[in-house]
Image (spheres, rainbow, N blue to C red):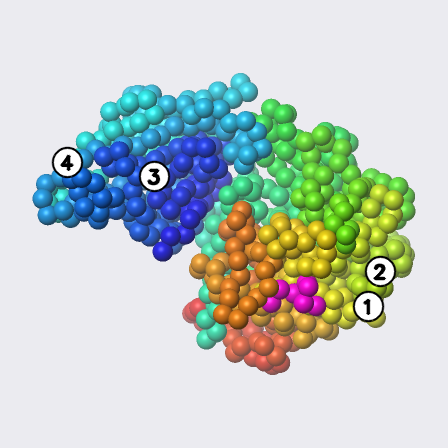
Amino acid sequence: MLTGQITQLRGSSFVVSDERGDLNPGSAEGFFCADTRYLDRLVLRLSGRRLVALRSGTAMADRALFYLTNQASRTLPAGALTVVRERWLDQVGRLHEKIEVANYAGRPVRTRLTLELGSDFADIFEARGKGVVGKSVAPQPSRDGLQLTGVRDGAVSRLSITSRPRPRLMGLRAAYPVALAPGGCFTLLLSFEPDRRCRTAMAPSARRAAHGWVEAAPRLVTADHRLLAAYVRSLSDLASLRLALADHRQIPAAGLPWFVAVFGRDALVTGFETLVLGPELAAAALDALAAYQARADEPGRDAEPGKIPHEVRVGVLATSGRLPHARYYGSVDATPLYVVLLAELFRWTRDRALLARHLPTAEAALAWIEHSGDLDGDGFVEYRRRAPEGLRNQGWKDSDDAIRFADGRVAEGPIALCEVQAYVHAARLAIAELYEAVGRGTEAQRQRAEAELLRRRFEDAFWLPEEGTYALALDGAKRRVDAVASNAGHCLWAGIASPERASSVAERLLAPDMFSGWGIRTMAASAGGYSPVSYHCGSVWPHDNAMIAAGFRRYGLDAAAERVVVALLEASDHFPGHRLPELFCGFERREGGFPVDYPAACSPQAWAAAAVPYLLQTLLGLRPADGRLVAAPLAATPRLELRGVRGPEGAVDLRAEARRAELSPATGLPRAG
């Protein structure tokens, strides 16, 4: 079984290879660390010929295996030699590889193993195809082995290579003579060590914390193999995506391969989706993003005081100032989502120290909402790009063509997205709740009044009576962008939708042109801009669906929520290892069919991995209320136990099945699942 692209990840180091384990020049493959590609080619040949892949894959996030064999030649039949490549990343960002060549020809064999290796030291944005990539640098001998050295924008990057045995160098090729007796084996050991700026080492306490997070997560016990497998995969992927920052705080990277970095929106949504697993990811997101909150107006970064960052990068294009992404703030929704997550985390933990630490950040975020966020004073938060290299669209659907009218025309800004108004409404109610908790009742009352005013304006401005749902957005002329899109479901998730209209929204989102059978599409198949293979105009995103399902439950639309939860869990059955990818194509489900991969989807990806525990939480109806956890399982809930869920009154064990739940203090018994 060949899987195409193989990815590995540990800290900020990752590898993207083909199914042979090769890194092919001219592609997006490579060994990356700290937003820099340290190897752009690593191509293995025997007697000058590429190898045939038998099977390859990753049993663990940082380790891959590649089983290969030789092609037929004049001197050897196919399959006479086998090659096993074992590749892993260590805790400080180094790449290691063990290559074993075994002879099953029944006679002595002489051949030559060659590795074509080099580096263009491309920035991550160049490797993704957004810039010109230079030629590969050839390795040079060094005291300990080989070395690759490149200079980009005045920054020197080095990769040290240790090889046992040592090779003979011929330009970009390292050659090893191989003489094998019948049944004999040749072993090559390689280590690739980036320069010190790439080190991703975590302190021992941080490494223990990463392992301890998985151990502390609730243990699911159920005979439902699909649910259990998806849950276990989710824990594994979320652990592997945790980035250690300079002060050893850990925050989930957005996704592999192109988003192994801090992303504000992704970290906040992931934190929200994983509260059932514990408070750590949510608290880490709040901590890290508070440190990056904008303090000044910088048009070149789309920054304004109080904004939460969109993206933080450390590659040479960002740090040299050629791109704004060292700290880039082109996200219209991360700022209100920060406030919403803080309040939800406080409901789960009742942690007053956490509230005191982050309330000033939330207040600065609210000040941005009330001033800079409302570009024209109409009461809605809009976005426009100010940074020349910034994002044209700055909601979660941030591709250039994502915001379209029903006839397919791309909307011109400034753009007021429907879900952003919903997040702002939720943020005002959230900070009102936090103000009440600290005895600031007058300010709480003002925020509730502002939230209600926004809700009324929103209903008037965004409702599409002919479609029975909310408009995707308002464009720069305040016209309703009338394509039917999944964004309206977030209006239920955040609670701005009127109870009278919620069921209509759910019905529209589950209509055949929106619901593919595997999930809710990002845009209706009846819209002019729809394509099932579009990134944001017809695909299915697990995190989007998980949030919509939670919104359905918020309004008591249990049958609708159940339909979405079941569809996503059934989809997970068809992906390797039950891993839900960032997104998949929006093709209609057919009898005996399967969901179709989106070619460039991140996998693993943080908010897709986090969608699984959030779907489980929605299935169980599990939430904090009045200082304790309550549950109301849906009819589709299988018999299960969720042991050690941490809530406001301590850890509890949950036993549940269809429409029945029992919560009791955690027993501390040995965990399984």
As helix, strand or loop, the secondary structure at mark 3 comes to: strand
Residue 290: percent from the left, percent from the top? 68, 42
Q: Label the magenta part by its dominant secondary structure.
A: loop
Query: Which kind of residue does numbered mark 4 sit on?
Result: Arg
Image point (51%, 43%), residue name: 257
As helix, strand or loop, the secondary structure at mark 1 comes to: helix
**Marks 4 and 3 in Cβ contact (< 8 Å):** no
Quadrant the C terminus occupies? bottom left
**Marks 1 and 2 in Cβ contact (< 8 Å):** yes
Q: Nearer the viewer, mark 3 or mark 1?
A: 1
Distance of label 2 from label 3 (alpha carbons): 57 Å
Q: Which residue in the protein does label 4 denote?
A: 110
- In the depicted view, which residue is nearer to us: 645 or 329? 329
Distance of label 1 from label 2 (alpha carbons): 9 Å
Q: Which residue in the protein does label 2 denote?
A: 463
Query: Which kind of residue does numbered mark 1 sit on?
Result: Arg
| Mark closer to the chain start, 2 or 4 | 4
Q: How many marks?
A: 4
Q: Which residue in the protein does label 3 denote?
A: 96
Image point (29%, 49%), residue name: 67
Quarter residue 178 falls in: top left
586 horizontally vs 443: left or right: left
